[in-house]
Image (spheres, grey):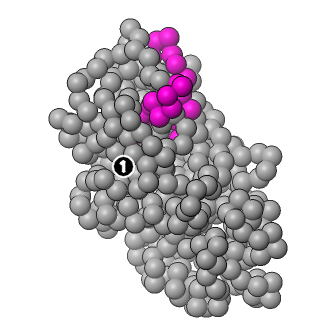
Amino acid sequence: MFTPRTLISLILITASSVVEAGPLSRNSNFDVGKSTVHFSRKINAHGTHTFAEMDRARLQALKRTGQLGKRDGSSVSIANSATVSTINVGVGEPASTFNLVVDTASSDTWVGAKSNNPYKVTSTSKDTGNSVSAAYGTGSFVGEEYLDTVTLSPYLVIKDQSIGVANQSNSVYGDGVFGLGPIDLTEGVVSNTESVPTVTTNLFAQGKIPWEAVAIFLTPFAESRNEGELTFGGVDYSKNASQFRYAPLTTTSPSSRSWGIDASAFYGETAVMQETCWYHRLRLYAHYLAIGYPHLILSPTDAIDNYQSAIAAVHDSKTGFFRITSSQYSALKTLTFTIGSASLQLTPNAQIWPRSLNSAIGGDPDSIYLNHR
């Protein structure tokens, strides 16, 4: 079972040939040649939107993207996220350091969101002459495309990585965005270009990592320790005490354009979600089962309606979350997700927002909020 104190590991395998080959075991040398970098996380609840509204806006934008078949002015990304993860990235030689938002729901990397930390042209900078733009619901940026050296660590140095250099941006946390989504999500972002190699794609193509994959390790949110790790090219098995589970990416749009999977769910003995496409928005802020702690678990609308009805939860307009009483919490049943051949169970405590963080979402300190919407 997953509990709020579970440490979470997730692998995003970007090479389709690896996915089709099936699970990778410890004997597959999947941990050989890997390299790990650290990132930090924080709650980004601010402004006039509730925490839940910001995360739902991301999901709706992803749906619009899938319906159009390419990125549009409402493309989903981390800018509207209620939680953010950031990583320090060096750009150029000598490198300037940018604190970028890590985003698995978009694939472009760009800098220059803050006027006090602008992009600096160095000997490795190459202006392609192409324009670049993306919109994230309430945030956006426009600028120019450059090819430049990007440094994640002494072992992860990428030559001629495409980056956006913002001329204008708004409502974007940090210095820009570090995209870890599939390459398809770069379509329509850069002018005169069909798609752009992502950071992970170039790391693999330049022989820096043995596999085109990213393993993400998260710890549950706490007031004193909010951090995680990105392992490029392999898996840090020391971070996971149980067996890894694998599931194919869905073929159902729009989730097929990102990290989407097919899943079903039972609340106790009651089916609340038949097998359907489920957008796994692990923004490291991701989400997905225990990763939903303390991120929202965003399931199809009918599944949420069924789940809410079974619990008799009420909508809290102040936070945008569903709220339950102490007696309802005591009666909560296990919520079980079936993904492929694996059954993953959420205990009652894993189904609620951490009460110690109620103030971060504008909630009452003694109230109990469900972690689903």
- Is 100 one of the magenta-colored residues? yes
State the residue at coordinates (34%, 29%).
162
- Is 20 one of the magenta-colored residues? no
Crowding at dot 1, Cα within 10 Å, few <14 / some 14-19 / many 20+, comes out as many
Q: Is residue 118 above or below residue 213?
A: above
- Horizontally, residue 348 falls left or right of residue 93, namely right
Q: In the image, residue 140 lies at what x, y percent?
A: 39, 45
Image quadrant of residue 130? Answer: top left
State the residue at coordinates (80%, 88%).
327
Region in magenta: 92-117
What residue is disc 1 on?
135
Residue furthest left as drawn? 192
Residue situated in front as seen by the camera: 199 or 236? 199
Q: Amino acid at mark 1?
A: Ala
Q: Is residue 57 above or below residue 116?
A: below
Q: For the C terminus, which image quadrant? A: bottom right
- Horizontally, residue 188 falls left or right of residue 328, namely left
Q: In the image, residue 210 lies at what x, y percent?
A: 45, 32
Q: In the image, residue 330 lies at what x, y percent?
A: 80, 85
Image quadrant of residue 38? Answer: top right
Residue situated in front as seen by the camera: 362 or 81? 362
Q: What secondary structure is found at the residue carrying circle 1?
A: strand
Q: In the image, residue 105 lies at what x, y percent?
A: 44, 52
Report if residue 57 is visible in the image.
yes
State the residue at coordinates (36%, 16%).
125
Q: Is residue 288 above or below residue 223?
A: below
State the residue at coordinates (52%, 66%).
53
